[in-house]
Structures are given as C-alpha cells and as structure tokens.
Image (spheres, helix red, strand yellow):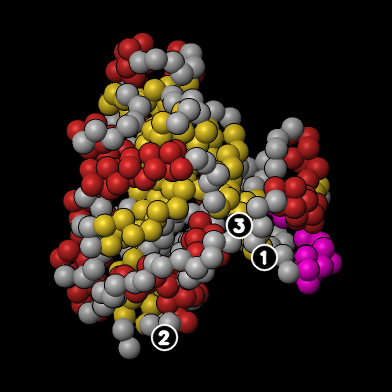
Amino acid sequence: MKKLMILGAGIYQVPLIKKAREMGLFTIVVSYPGPYPGFALGDECLYLDTTDGSAVLDAARKLGIDGICTTGTDVAVSTIGLVAESLGLRGIPHEAALLATDKLRMKEAFQKNGVTSAPFLKVSSFEEAKDAFLKLSKPVMVKAVDSSGSRGVSKVSTLSELSGAYQASAEVSRQPYVILEEFVDGTEIGVDGFVENGSVVLLLPHQKFVLTSGATSLPAGHAFPYPASERVLASIGHEIRKAVSALCLDNCAFNADVMICGETPFLLEMGGRAGATGIPELVSLYCGFDFYQKMIENALGETPDFACGTPKPCMSRLLFSPVDGTITRIDSSVIRKLRNEGADFSLDYGEGDPVSKVRNGTDRIGQVILPSSSEPEMNALMKRLYAAVFVDGISLWERWEVCHETV
C-alpha cells in the first residue's frame, strides 16, 4: 500500500484526506496538535509543525512515503518542496515553494520577469512604513508576506489608519518585514490551474465573491467560469504563464489572485497549491474530473490527465458569523429539507461549538456548492442556511441584517 503524507489537518485538507483513503492509500496526516478534523481521518497522525521542514523530512524519510501534498494553505508549501526535492518525489521545487510563500520574494520575482503587478515597498518598522506610505500612490495595501486567507492584509487610505494595519500584518508574520503595495482598482478574480512538466496544462479564471470585514477584504466564494472577452482571457493566460515562469512553479497546482483593470490583468499573488473556498470542488464540477484525485496522482509520481469535459457553470459561497459566540441551535428540519432538495453544503460546527466573528478566511463556519450560475438561487439558499443557524439565540440571518452586511 502506497503511503501519502498530507500536511495539514484542517477543514480544507479533509476532502484531500478522504479522497486518498478512497484511493486505497495509507494516509499520514501531519499538523501541530489541535482540534483539527483531519486527525480523525488519517491512518497515522504526526503532531509536527508543518513549517518545520527538517522534522517533517526526517519523519517522511523514516516512514518511506511515496508522496506528499496539501491543499488550501500556504504555510506547508515550502516543507513540501523540501521533502519532495530531498526524497526525489514529484512536487513543487523547493526554490519555487520559497518564492510562492513569501510575498516580498514573489513580488521581486514578478518585477524582475516583467509580470504586470502593482508597485510595492518592503518595510521593517513602522517608521519605514510611514515613509513608504508617503511615497506610494494611495490607497495602499499593507500585507504580511507569509500568510493566507487574507490574514494580516488591510487597505489603508490615510496615515492615521497605518499604525493598526502595520501592527496587524507584523503580528501574523514570521518574517521581520511586511510590504506596502499600491492598491489596484478593478474587478478581482481568481485563476486556478496546474503546471505539469514545465507547462501550464490547466488554466481556469473564475469570478470571486468578496466580503469586507473592517479594512480587510476576503474571499467569500467563487463562480466558474469568468465571463470575459477572448482578448482579456488571452491576456490573463499570458500573465499567468509569465508568473508561473517567474516563480519556477512545476508539478503543482497554482492559485492566483488577479485584478482586472479595464482589459489589463494585474497579478496580485500566486500560490503553489490549490485554492481554498471550495475551489477544488468547483474545478471538479466544472471540468468533470476529481481535482483532489489529480493532485494526489501528481504527488505519487503519475502524470494526471487534465482533459476537461463539457464545462458546467457552478459557484461556491462560505458561511460566516458577524459576531463571536456559541451555536445554540441548528434547525434540523431546515437542514434536512435542504439536503432532501439536493443542496450541497457542509457545516463545520455543531450545537454548543464556539464560532468566531469573521476576520479572515479561516473563520468560515460552512461551505455551499451550487451546480448553477444563478446568483439569486445561491442567495436564496444562503438565506435559508443562515436562518437555520442560531448564535447565542439569534439566527445568523438576523445578525447579518443588523450588521448591514451582504451575505
């Protein structure tokens, strides 16, 4: 039986672990200790920090693994690069993993290789941040360089807002610096795909739903496909291929954030792994193959076939809470009725579980997948779900209405 090491035991890694088990693989789930649902699914669990490359490499060597992978998180990608390269396994090159998980090095690589991206400056102190703010066009984005899920990312328009934004970025980063980047105004989209033997073999631009929480905008869902002219789609493909080359990505999934300004795509970020927010499920539904399975096949040294069937429009949305609190009730009759109607959704928490006010993408409390491009249909489904979940005695639908947020 082949052994697959999966880094991360969180909600976004659960479908990957389940698929590996379905494929008859021995799964080794690695994460630092915590109440993560993936631990209950693995054949073997290792309680290690997934950013500790040396410790994970030692464990992988001792266990004789046949492959290593993750999905939906950046923090483990550099370790995957190290382990794959050290053990001769198929996966993202280590140098590429380092470039793709440090936004400063990423932006420098984009700049060096002519990738269209926003001007930026590195800062290592608040005084440097003030100087950079004055030099750059406003507003600016203040970003932690090694986080995902929009953690430590804020939009700043005035000098008075800078201190809190800088502190928020510095607190979540393991690096002694952050970046300030000029804000690019346009339509933000996502682009997911796969690089195989040096070539982009899958490239899927898609719409992005964004939720604003304070000074942070975070992905709240996606819709396939992205409706654009052939000219714009060709420009997106051109910039994506330049970015893949700049970061030396290979034999891995990629996930990019792109801002479309007029007909010009600006690369904001690119990761060397599949996106979160239901993206693997949407890729699978849209293309007609199981994207988790393709990622696993790649990790095991195979050459997956990414030929797509007839595209099927689809979308996803995440559920969030606008307040900290405890789930006091879930209306089981509504949940049962929605499931009987064929709704594809999951709730990450149950009655009695605490939930956090939405601050970044990791604060999700559930996920909805809809095999349709109808936003009104999705909105109606979301309303019914939010009305069925009660936090401290009040439905999330009522709480969102009080907060005047769009759900």
**Residue 258 image position (x, y, % from top left):** 43, 38
Of tags 3 and 1, the one toward the viewer is: 3
Residue type of the residue flagged with mark 1? Asp
Of tags 1 and 2, the one toward the viewer is: 1
**Residue 78 image position (x, y, % from top left):** 26, 54
| In the image: residue 355, left or right of residue 110 | right
Mark 1 neighbour class, 10 Å CA radius: few under 14, some 14 to 19, many 20 or more: few
Q: Give the Cα separation between the discs numbered 1 and 2.
A: 25 Å
Residue type of the residue flagged with mark 2? Gly
Counting the numbered discs, the total is 3
Residue 38 magenta-highlighted: no
Q: Give the Cα separation between the discs numbered 3 and 1.
A: 12 Å
210 or 290: nearer the eye? 290
Q: In which quarter of the image is the C terminus?
A: top right
Identify the residue under disc 2: 24
Quarter of the image where one finds residue 323: top right
Residues shaded magenta: 326-341
**Residue 246 image position (x, y, % from top left):** 23, 43
Identify the residue under disc 3: 314
Quarter of the image where one finds residue 329: bottom right
Identify the residue under disc 1: 344
